Amino acid sequence: MASSNSLTPDELTFYQDQGYLILPGRFRADVERLREEAAGLLARTELISKDNMRCRWLPHHLTGESLFECYDPITDISPLLLKYSRDPRLVEPLRSIYGCDPCLRHDQLIYKPPGCGGYSLHQDFMGWPGYPTTFLTAIIALDAIDTENGCIQVYPGIHKQGYLSPIDEEYHEVPKEKLVGIEPVELKLNPGDVAMFGCFTPHASGFNRSADRWRRQLFFCYNAETDGGDARDAHYRFYNDWKLKKYVAYGKTNAYFA
């Protein structure tokens, strides 16, 4: 039975046709609480290290300075954010899409400070054994998100073509020539808005060109219960092993996870 948090038929049709969806204001009343949690986690200096695989870094788009950008994962060190990943305001829309319960698979807290670089065009699907085709990202915006501070851009409708890269357990960028004639949509969000897109939706994000504005977003990624079930722990074991091999290949031998 549908709840007040379920998608409307029009919202579900839009998501299925376009590969993304924005749900305005769902967490507007929670923004200050979430910002306080993000600030507290940013103060965990014992965790923030270039050798800690939980932490992600990107260069400043002008100076090249390495900037701390993201915790990945986050819910295992924040009971509050784990609670939000199970909130009906997220779970019920996902249940509308899946037709069954969603299972949390991957989670990140992205800070994207002023000057921080962005991400090139890609799809979230990975050609790993058993990777779920129902992998879906739900974002909660903690700040106002726009072009200046590096909002995500999605390419609508392309998800219907499936995965556009070789299935070989490697990360691949999507060549722009595969998207000729498709105009990207910027996911401009107000604090507390939710955005969703599936793993076959190509997307990218720009630099944070603002002088003093962060672009903090919570990323909660799920799969359908019928497509892999509750496999977050196994997913992160594989993911961290995959990352460690990449680090060693690039000569980074001091990597650890904490």
Image (spheres, grey):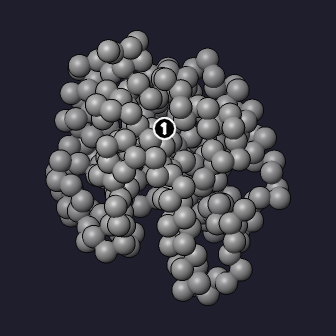
Residue that appears at 75% across and 47% down? 42
Q: Position of residue 26 (x, y in %)?
A: 50, 21
234 or 76, which lies in front? 234
According to the picture, the residue beneath numbered tag 1 turns out to be: 139
139 or 131, which lies in front? 131
Image position of 127 (left or right of 189): left
Residue 194 versus residue 206 in the image, above or below: above
**Quadrant of the image for the C terminus?**
bottom right
Residue that appears at 23% across and 62% down? 164
Residue 6 visible in this rendered orientation of the protein: yes
Residue that appears at 41% across and 61% down? 120
Residue that appears at 54% across and 86% down? 249
107 or 30, which lies in front? 107
Residue 185 visible in this rendered orientation of the protein: no
Dot 1 crowding, Cα within 10 Å, few <14, some 14–19, many 20+: many
Residue 127 versus residue 145 in the image, above or below: below
Three-letter amino acid code of the residue under disc 1: Ile
Q: How many marks?
A: 1
Q: Position of residue 138 (x, y in %)?
A: 45, 38
Q: Position of residue 21 (x, y in %)?
A: 34, 32
Kindly state the secondary structure of the residue where label 1 is placed.
strand
Image position of 245 (left or right of 7): right
